């Protein structure tokens, strides 16, 4: 048996990743979450760096905590994927390709409430992928991955509730379609 070249191994990985994203697997869906965490890290920093107003000092502490938690989640999730014999995205290009959160350089000029609301909505968007990944992990009998994802979902929910409370709102205000149609 001949030794497979590094380039050939990577090409096979990319081909398999493409297949896994078209017929989603737990690993592929979890890579979306990993990618979203990378973009979220940048967005959390943007808010921390540019938030203005009387809430500045409070928000610095809040966003420092969110950044530390984000970094921890990113590292832990990559490790869980490796434990499951999956390949977490390992280049910026791959992470950007699979991220579903969007960045905007002009966002830095928004007011604090808009910045906090955007963070809440990002956590909510992440949860869409987490919920899908949990179902896939359960279907594929990956209980350790499912358990980590369930705990991560709970962490996102807590962050959303706390940020909503900071804005004087309940946990799901502005996130569910029912909020907009009070007929």
Image (cartoon, rainbow, N blue to C red):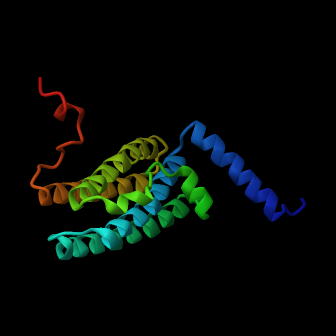
Q: Position of residue 8 (x, y in %)?
A: 81, 57
Q: In which quadrant is the C terminus drawn?
A: top left
- For image coordinates 71% across by 47% down, the residue present is 15
Q: Position of residue 44 (x, y in %)?
A: 35, 65
Residue at the limit of the structure toward the right, as seen here: 2
Residue 25 located left or right of residue 93: left
- For image coordinates 39% across by 46% down, the residue present is 134
Q: Position of residue 4 (x, y in %)?
A: 84, 61
- For image coordinates 29% across by 75% down, the residue present is 64
Residue 115 located left or right of residue 130: left
Placement of 45 over or under 172, stated as above or below: below
Q: Position of residue 135 (x, y in %)?
A: 40, 41
Q: Quadrant of residue 91?
A: bottom right
Residue at the limit of the structure toward the top, as seen here: 183
- Evaluate whether residue 50 shows in this view: yes
Please state which of residues 91 and 63 is positioned toward the viewer in this rendering: 63
Please state which of residues 32 and 61 is positioned toward the viewer in this rendering: 61
Placement of 69 over or under 10, stated as above or below: below
Residue 93 located left or right of residue 102: right
Q: In which quadrant is the N terminus drawn?
A: bottom right
Question: How many numbered tags mark residues here?
Answer: 0
- Evaluate whether residue 86 shows in this view: no
Placement of 19 over or under 71, stated as above or below: above
Please state which of residues 4 and 74 is positioned toward the viewer in this rendering: 74
């Amino acid at each position: 048996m001949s030794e497979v070249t590094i380039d050939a191994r990577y090409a096979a990985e990319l081909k398999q990743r493409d297949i896994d994203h078209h017929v989603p697997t737990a690993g592929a869906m979890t890579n979306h979450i990993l990618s979203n965490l990378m973009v979220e890290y940048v967005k959390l920093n943007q808010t921390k760096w540019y938030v203005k107003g009387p809430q500045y000092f409070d928000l610095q502490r809040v966003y420092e905590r969110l950044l530390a938690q984000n970094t921890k989640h990113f590292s832990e999730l990559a490790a869980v994927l490796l434990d499951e014999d999956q390949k977490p995205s390992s280049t910026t290009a791959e992470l950007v390709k699979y991220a579903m959160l969007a960045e905007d350089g002009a966002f830095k000029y928004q007011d604090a409430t808009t910045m906090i609301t955007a963070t809440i909505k990002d956590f909510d968007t992440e949860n869409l992928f987490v919920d899908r990944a949990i179902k896939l992990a359960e279907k594929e009998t990956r209980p350790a991955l499912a358990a980590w994802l369930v705990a991560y979902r709970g962490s996102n929910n807590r962050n959303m509730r706390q940020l909503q409370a900071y804005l004087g709102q309940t946990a799901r205000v502005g996130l569910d379609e029912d909020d907009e149609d009070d007929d």
